[in-house]
Amino acid sequence: MSYPAERPQVNTPGIQNEQRPGDLPRILVADKDPLALENIHAAVRNQPWAVSWACDAADAIALVKKSRPHLVLLDLALPGYDGIQLIRLIHELSPETQILVHTAIHSTESAVNAMRAGAEDYLNKPVAANIIRERLTYWLAQREIQNRDVKTELDLLDSFTFGGVVGRSPAMLHLLARVRRVAPHFTTALVSGETGSGKELVARALHTWSGTLGSFVACNCASIVDTLFESELFGHKRGSFTGATEDRPGLVLAAANGTLFLDEIGEMPLPLQAKVLRLLQNREVRPLGDNNAVKVDLRIVAATNRDLRKQVADGTFREDLFYRLSTVHFSVPPLRERHEDLPLLIRHFLVDCAAKYGKPGLNLSRRAELVLTRYFWPGNIRELENALNYACMMAKNSVIDINDLPDYLLTPTESEQKSTPLTMAEVEYQHALHVLQLCDGNRLRAAELLGIGRATLYRMLARHETPPRT
């Protein structure tokens, strides 16, 4: 028998390296059990795969560093390293590598620990050659699907970017359709939504689709000192107050023939609200220290994350200004209500980060993608953008793994830790759901890992038609 040069001798007849030329899927078999190796050899023989072999942890690590295999078939009892730690190390060295555990350690705990560490599948020895071949084929096919998904997302990103806004969810498509219809005609508009949900992007889309030739000028009402607000907005003449050493036109005149964006309009002081109302009514502005009003043609978009109706009732926002602004009103849905947009937004930010940080071809590992898709995103798109910028800076190569993500994405939130205690039935149900997620929805595999019959698992899930409280 013959072996690849990098593989140590194993006293098992008939096993040889299956490497072939070309860009074939690369598989690393890390096992020392002679019977298992015979079964694996029978499974991979005559398949279009490039197979390497290792019989201890040191050789497995060396081969992962050298060839970055697409898939590793790993025995948890491989000499020289703890199996769970070895899974983590392989992912650290090669985040894009998928790991299938193939072991004689039969326990639900070891299976769940392996999958939490990043294993994709868990096979209990002995396993027939045809089953091994089936699982290898399946996970290599999943890799191809993931690669195609990346290309599809890039194609969709071009198709579903409208005026700078990314979205394909029904809620966003409906919103953007309304924005496009209104844009050529509006003079004032109000955009509401949670912090970080993309209100300024919607305002910019209104400006872009309006066809105006002027600039888009943004003013954050929450960041300007009250005493300087009027000067910032309306401008001033030289000598109108101490420190006014020259004429200044102000943001309103800077936005002439374009769009003025008043972000966080709910933070604007009441005296200034009256002057903004006058601007909307008369379309003219009078800089501080100037006796003459200047006519100005512009569109005004205001945005808020507050309930302006409640502020009107509380007396902190002018009712007449509210009704003047909200003639055209757009409500931007939070990210948790537009989950279909998440893959496109992730791809959008990855493309931007790749250019920004000089890391072409940035992508997510499968388990990093799962973390991002399961997170609630209370900070909406801005939080997602910040998290991906951090992850891109941390990534050692072109693949972002979970260790590159911000720590808070991987730990329970304070609200989760203080949640109402669960009943035993709910604990069992949530554990079953967790194992089912680890098995990619395969109920037969989940039942095997839980040590229960498939019918028992079905009954457990059927008892909860809606998710239990958390």
Image (tube, grey):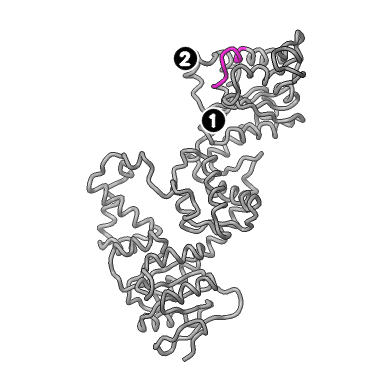
Q: Mark 2: which secondary structure?
A: helix
* Residue 10 horizontal/vertical position (percent): 41, 86
Mark 1 is surrounded, within 10 Å at the Cα level, by few (under 14), some (14 to 19) or many (20 or more) other residues, namely some
Of 129 and 290, nearer the camera is 290
Residue, disc 1: 331
Residue drawn at (74%, 21%) of the image: 253
Quadrant where the C terminus sits is top left
Relative to 202, 287 lies left or right: right
Disc 2 versus disc 1: distance between alpha carbons? 20 Å
| Residue at left offset 49%, top offset 89% | 2
Spot the residue most to the bottom: 1
Residue 169 image offset from top left, x and y in percent: 54, 42
Location of residue 399 (image quadrant): bottom right
Q: Which residue lies under the disc numbered 2?
A: 313
Using residue 249 as the reference point, say whether residue 278 is left or right of it. Answer: left
Residue at the outermost top position: 291
In the rendered structure, the answer to whether residue 437 lies left or right of residue 217 reads left
SS category of the residue bearing label 1:
strand
Q: Name the amino acid, label 2.
A: Ala
Does 270 lie within the magenta span? yes
Q: Residue at x 48, y 39 (%)?
A: 337
| Image vertical order of residue 374 relative to residue 185, above or below | below
Count of numbered badges drawn on the protein? 2
Q: Position of residue 356 (x, y in %)?
A: 65, 49
The front one of 281 and 174 is 281
Q: Which corner quadrant of the image does residue 135 belong to?
A: bottom left
Q: Main secondary structure of the magenta part?
A: helix
User: Magenta residues?
Assistant: 267-274
